[in-house]
Each structure stands twice: as C-alpha cells, then as structure tokens.
Image (spheres, rainbow, N blue to C red):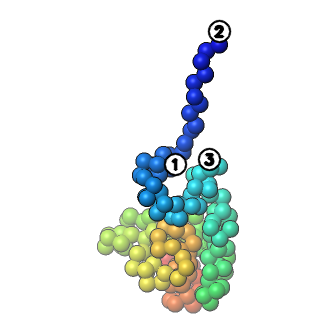
Amino acid sequence: MPAAAQPRRTRNSRLARALVAAGTGAAVLALPLIGATGASAATGSSTPSTTLAGYPNNLDGWIRESLAIMAEKKIPGTYNGIHRNIIRESSGNPSAINLWDSNAAKGIPSKGLLQVIDPTFNAYHVAGTSFNIYDPVANITAACNYAAARYGSIDNVFGAY
C-alpha cells in the first residue's frame, strides 16, 4: 500500500519570508525599494549582473555608467584616467576603506573606489546618483566632479588627491 503523500512545501527566499512576516503594509512599502534585488534573487545570485541603468555590474560597467552621467553634467574625464586612479586608490574594491591615513586619524576615513571622504562626497555629489558613498557609480562621479573642480579633470590626478 502506498504511503500517504505529504503536501509539498515550497522553498521561499529569506526576502519573501521576511516580507510575509513583516505584514502586508510593510511589504507594499518595501517592494519599490527592493524591486531590483528581488529580480536578482530569483536567479539565485546575490549581486545583479547589470546595474539599474543596464551596464555590467563590475568595474568596467561602473566606469562607463559614470562617464555617461559625467557627459550629461559636463564633468570632464576619461575611462583611462578614472581606471588608473581607481586601481591606485582601491584596487577596484567598492567597499575599500582607509583606516590609517591622516583623514582616518581625524575620524573621516576615505571610502569606496576612489577613496573619497564623506565631506568631499557630500559637497561634490552629483544629482541622480546614490547618496551612498560606497555606491560605485556615485563614488566615481562625485570624485570626478571634485577632481574637475580642483585639478581640471580626474585625468590630471596621478597621486593621492
């Protein structure tokens, strides 16, 4: 005699369980904020393969997306100038933070791909980009905006700035 079939329990992602637990009202409010994450979570990847603007979600794509924004805002800079400075400053790690230099000693460590301090990021933030200093596109674009004001272009920066 065959065993009684047990109802099959579907596997939910942590996000779905959290939304259900939070309640319908919170879920409705959270959905617009997490829409892009939900799409990537469905594929099993924790990092989307493209940015919201459609660029690859990697160093090349972040630089290209920043250059597109910079062109709209008339901020000078080239791919090579940005890439050279990123490699020197953070080796391409958007989560990089400098906890040992003079800025860090003052309590304002340099952060992100181009090692920007919070006051500089806030002063040179470019409209239309994230306010998160660790966001690669926002970090690059703000740093290039600062370099343009101070040195004429990120292309003219060959050391710590």
Sequence-first disc among 1 and 2: 2
Which-is-in-front pick, marks 3 and 2? 2
User: Measured along the vertical axis of the image, is residue 156 above or below residue 98?
Assistant: below
Disc 1 is placed on an element classified as helix
Horizontal and vertical percent for residue 55?
A: 68, 68
From where the camera sits, is residue 81 visible? no
Q: How far is disc 1 from disc 2 in space, using C-alphas?
A: 38 Å
Q: Which residue is at 42% across, 52% downward?
A: 23
Few, some or many C-alpha atoms within 10 Å of disc 2 (few <14, some 14-19, many ≥20)?
Answer: few
Q: Which residue is at the front of the view, 46 or 21? A: 21
Crowdedness of circle 3 by 10 Å Cα count: few (<14), some, many (20+)? few
To which residue does mark 2 refer?
1
Distance of label 3 from label 1 (alpha carbons):
13 Å
Mark closer to the chain start, 3 or 2: 2
Judge left or right: residue 69 versus residue 119.
right
* Residue lying at 43% horizontally and 58% vertically, measured from the top left: 26
Residue type at the position of mark 3 = Gly
Q: Which residue is mark 1?
A: 16
Element type at marker 3? Answer: loop
User: CA separation, marks 3 and 2?
Assistant: 39 Å
Which percent across, then down, holds residue 119?
39, 79
